[in-house]
Image (cartoon, rainbow, N blue to C red):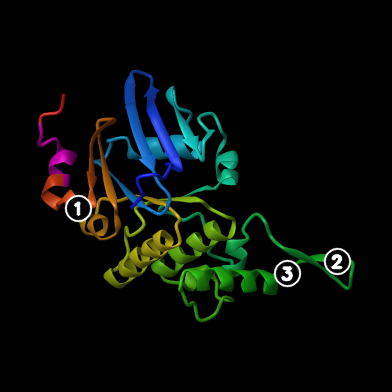
Amino acid sequence: MPSATAEPILRVEGVSKFFGGLTALNKVDLEVYPGEVVALLGDNGAGKSTLIKCVSGVYRADEGRILFNGHDITDASPSKVREMGIETIYQDLALAENLDVGANVFLGKEKEKRLLGLIPVTDDEYMRREAAGVLDRLDIHIPSLKQKLVRLSGGQRQAVALARALYWDARLIIMDEPTAALGVPEQRKVLALVKTLREQGIPVIIISHTMQDVMEVADRMVVLRRGRKVAEVPRSEATVDLLVKHIVGGFDVA
């Protein structure tokens, strides 16, 4: 949890987003502090994905502003946002299943070496070695980094996606439904990864419909409904019933 003197690493101020006559976000405020896990909750159509896409640069906010480490990123492109240290891991993970672990960590930024001093080839051993180092940091063991990703479990793939983000200096990680379609053992591994990130001071925004996951890892829960922020609940005050009531509109909201 943030200290009383901590400054937020991410500050969303009065952000609205419109699509024609539809208000997808209505003056939403959000702060995320170093080393905390914030759960973003809401039913389908509540505005969660739209808010994340505004933060990650996919959408441009129509009103309000977004600050990251004190820099205004409201109009920044997705590549600029990533360069500044915000990494979004979507459900599809955006990994190349036909490549091995090292190649996925370096995807799009492959390390090369010169064969016989002349011919450029990818330096697979270097990439695997670097990947192994960051996986160790996450306390994840994959028996062979030469395996293609298609042969790895869902939890291991999540670990590779996180390893890639950390290797390239992510300072805020957004995870969209990270435990969806995973079995219980794999869900446990992913939640352990989230806790590891928090212990290393890297804040996480986690979008999830699974209340038990949220209750286990989140320090704070932010609830959106119909594009508005309707609740912000610290873990110490949160119950599943309370969160569900906010999500479905069980309280009178002005």
Magenta stretch mostly in which secondary structure? helix
Q: Decide: few, some or many residues near mark 2? Use Cα within 10 Å; few <14, some 14-19, many ≥20.
A: few
Q: Quadrant of residue 47?
A: top left
Q: Which residue is painted at 22% across and 57% down in the image?
A: 215
Residue 209, x across and y down, in percent: 25, 50
Task: Give yes or no for residue 143 being in the magenta stretch.
Answer: no
Q: Quadrant of residue 6?
A: top left
Q: Which residues are magenta?
A: 243-251
Badge nearest the viewer, 2 or 1: 1
Assign a secondary structure to mark 1. helix
Q: Decide: few, some or many residues near mark 1? Use Cα within 10 Å; few <14, some 14-19, many ≥20.
A: few
Three-letter amino acid code at disc 2? Ile
Residue 89 visible in image: no
Three-letter amino acid code at disc 3? Asp
Of mark 2 and mark 1, the one earlier in the sequence is 2
Task: Give yes or no for residue 250 being in the magenta stretch.
Answer: yes
The relative height of residue 62 versus residue 106 in the rendered view (above or below) is above
Quickly name the residue at label 1: 236
**Disc 1 versus disc 3: distance between alpha carbons?**
49 Å
Quickly name the residue at label 3: 123
Q: Which residue is painted at 34% across and 32% down in the image?
A: 29
Quarter holding the C terminus is top left
Residue 176, x across and y down, in percent: 38, 50
* Number of marks in picture: 3
Assign a secondary structure to mark 2. strand
Tell me, for residue 119, which label it has, or none.
2
**Disc 2 versus disc 1: distance between alpha carbons?**
59 Å
User: Which residue is outermost to the bottom?
Assistant: 143
Q: Decide: few, some or many residues near mark 3? Use Cα within 10 Å; few <14, some 14-19, many ≥20.
A: some
Q: Which residue is painted at 41% across and 71% down in the image?
A: 153
Badge nearest the viewer, 1 or 3: 1
